[in-house]
Structures are given as C-alpha cells and as structure tokens.
Image (cartoon, helix red, strand yellow):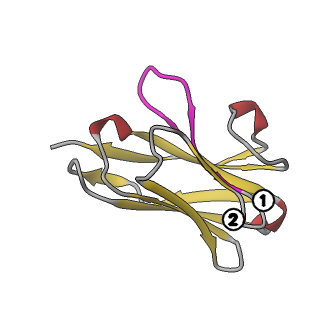
Amino acid sequence: QVYLVESGGGAVQPGGSLRLSCAVSGGSSNTYAMGWFRQAPEKEREFVAAISWTGNGREYADAVKGRFTISSGGAKNTVYLQMNSLKPDDTAVYFCAAAKGYPLSEVRDINLWGQGTQVTVSS
C-alpha cells in the first residue's frame, strides 16, 4: 500500500521561503501524477501545483505562479514544493496528493492524500 508523508512546513515571515517534501512510501510515484493542495481555515481545499509522472508536465494555480515550483527527485519517490515570496494568504495546511490521471486540479481527481503540513506566513 502506498503512503504519502509530507514534511517541511513551519512558520515564516512574509517574503520568506519554505520547501515542502512529500515522500512516497510503499511504492513509487512513477505511476502517479503528484500534486499539492492547500486548505485554509473555513475554506475549501484548493489546488496549488501538479507534476505528471514523467516530470515533463507541470501546472500551477494562478495564485502561486512565478512563486512556487513543483519538482520530483530521488528516483521520483519524493515530490517537492519550493515556495518563495510567501504571503499571509499562503497560510494553510498543505496536502500532498497522488492521482492515476493527469492533469489533476480537482479534489475529485485524487486517489491518495498525505496527512498535511501546516504553513504559516505572518510577521
């Protein structure tokens, strides 16, 4: 059985950077498209970024384009989200996600979820 385990969240000041990691345990991300979603308090879970299983396709939500970068590494068993120029509006729980299909941008597209990691941007 495949599990997704996130790490790298924390608190940072506006303009700062964080790097989230998602380790695929019990299998390989080679057969999954991978992505990141986030959920702020009292808001619905929303798409952030996605990468195809080949690594050649990448998509971003408009709110994070130019600031966030999704990548894969470690024999494609780890997916990263580099977040730069963070804003208070980026504060949320970030969830790693895996899907059999690509592209993925909706919650209904997702087959597996990680447990989530908190990102707080505040001065």
- The residue depicted at 41 percent of the width and 46 percent of the height is 118
Percent position (x, y) of residue 95?
Answer: 56, 45
- The residue depicted at 28 percent of the width and 38 percent of the height is 88
* Up-down relation of residue 89 to residue 59 (above or below): above
The amino acid pointed to by label 1 is Val
The answer to if 66 sits in the magenta stretch is no
**Which image quarter holds the C terminus?**
top left
- The residue depicted at 66 percent of the width and 57 percent of the height is 4
Which of the two residues, 84 or 98, is positioned nearer the viewer here? Answer: 84
Q: Distance of mark 2 from mark 1, alpha carbons? A: 7 Å
Q: Looking at the rendered structure, which numbered label has been put on residue 2?
A: 1
Give the mark, 2 or 1, whose residue is nearer the N terminus: 1
- Secondary structure, mark 2, is strand
- The residue depicted at 47 percent of the width and 22 percent of the height is 43
Q: Looking at the rendered structure, which numbered label has been put on residue 24?
A: 2
- Secondary structure, mark 1, is loop
Where is residue 122, by image quadrant?
top left
Where is residue 87, by image quadrant?
top left
Q: What is the span of residues highlighted in magenta in the rendered image?
A: 38-51
Would residue 2 be found to the left or right of residue 10 on screen?
A: right
Would residue 91 be found to the left or right of residue 110 on screen?
A: left
Which of the two residues, 73 or 3, is positioned nearer the viewer here? Answer: 73
Percent position (x, y) of residue 114?
Answer: 62, 49
Q: Do the CB atoms of the residues marked 2 and 1 lie less than 8 Å apart?
A: yes
Where is residue 30, by image quadrant?
bottom right
Q: Is residue 26 visible?
A: no
- Residue farthest top in this picture: 42
Specify few, some or many for label 2: CA neighbours under 10 Å numbering under 14, 14-19, or 20 or more.
many
The amino acid pointed to by label 2 is Val
